[in-house]
Image (spheres, rainbow, N blue to C red):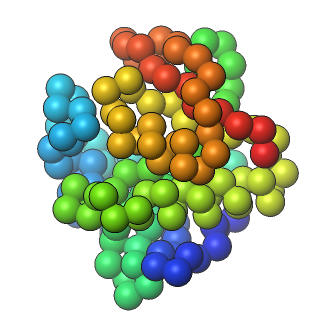
């Protein structure tokens, strides 16, 4: 279940051949979350393996997002997240630092939201750290609203959500 291409972007499954690109996407500094630990190449390897497993198990995961010309922008997709005893379908997105601020995450996340709706998923959330205001704006632009604060992975998170 790949999301539909957009005017500027297309989606494909992540493969082990994406290791260099995903290391760059996940490992770079993040001005929105300066205290976050920098992810390593080994972290990117685990990330790719987790997504490949998600495709096989669920039919979705985080997909590679590319320009129509084939340049990797980042990743965006759907994953199951456990939060306070509940399993939720989350839209997630990561864009290379140099490409942020161009609406690419919103464009990709909109197509992913539509794919989730078309696949019959009743609800979608985004779980975001309070300091990550750019990600919060993306969630709001795709129609998710702030519903609550929760605790995940050692810290507070904001849960944005919407019925599809």
Q: Quadrant of the C terminus?
A: top right
Residue nearest the observer in this picture, 37 or 99: 99
The residue sitting at the bottom extreme is 69
Q: Is residue 122 left or right of residue 102?
A: right
Q: Position of residue 123 (x, y in %)?
A: 75, 38
Residue at screen point 54% across, 42% down: 140
Q: Position of residue 27 (x, y in %)?
A: 20, 47
Residue at screen point 59% across, 50% down: 142
Residue nearest the observer in this picture, 23 or 142: 142
Work out whether 50 lies above or below 102.
above
Count of marks, rendered view: 0
Residue nearest the observer in this picture, 82 or 44: 82
Residue at screen point 51% across, 62% down: 108
Work out whether 158 lies above or below 107.
above
Q: Quadrant of the N terminus?
A: bottom right
Work out whether 80 lies above or below 82.
below
Q: Is residue 83 left or right of residue 71?
A: right
The image quarter containing residue 23 is bottom left
Residue at screen point 77% across, 38% down: 163
Is residue 23 at least partly visible in the picture? yes
Is residue 52 at least partly visible in the picture? no
Q: Is residue 21 left or right of residue 129?
A: left
Q: Position of residue 113 (x, y in %)?
A: 65, 54
Q: Position of residue 131 (x, y in %)?
A: 31, 27
């Amino acid at each position: 279940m790949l999301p539909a291409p957009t005017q500027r972007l297309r989606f494909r499954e992540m493969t082990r051949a994406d290791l260099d690109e995903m290391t760059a996407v996940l490992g770079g500094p993040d001005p929105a979350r300066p205290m976050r630990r920098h992810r390593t190449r080994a972290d990117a390897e685990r990330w790719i393996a987790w997504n490949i497993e998600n495709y096989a198990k669920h039919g979705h995961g985080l997909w590679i997002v590319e320009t129509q010309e084939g340049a990797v922008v980042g990743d965006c997709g759907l994953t199951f997240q456990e939060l306070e005893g509940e399993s939720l379908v989350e839209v997630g997105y990561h864009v290379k630092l140099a490409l942020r601020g161009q609406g690419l995450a919103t464009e990709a996340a909109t197509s992913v939201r539509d794919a989730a709706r078309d696949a019959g998923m009743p609800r979608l959330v985004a779980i975001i750290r309070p300091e990550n205001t750019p990600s919060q704006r993306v969630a709001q632009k795709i129609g998710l609203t702030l519903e609550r604060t929760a605790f995940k992975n050692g810290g507070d998170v904001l849960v944005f959500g919407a019925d599809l």
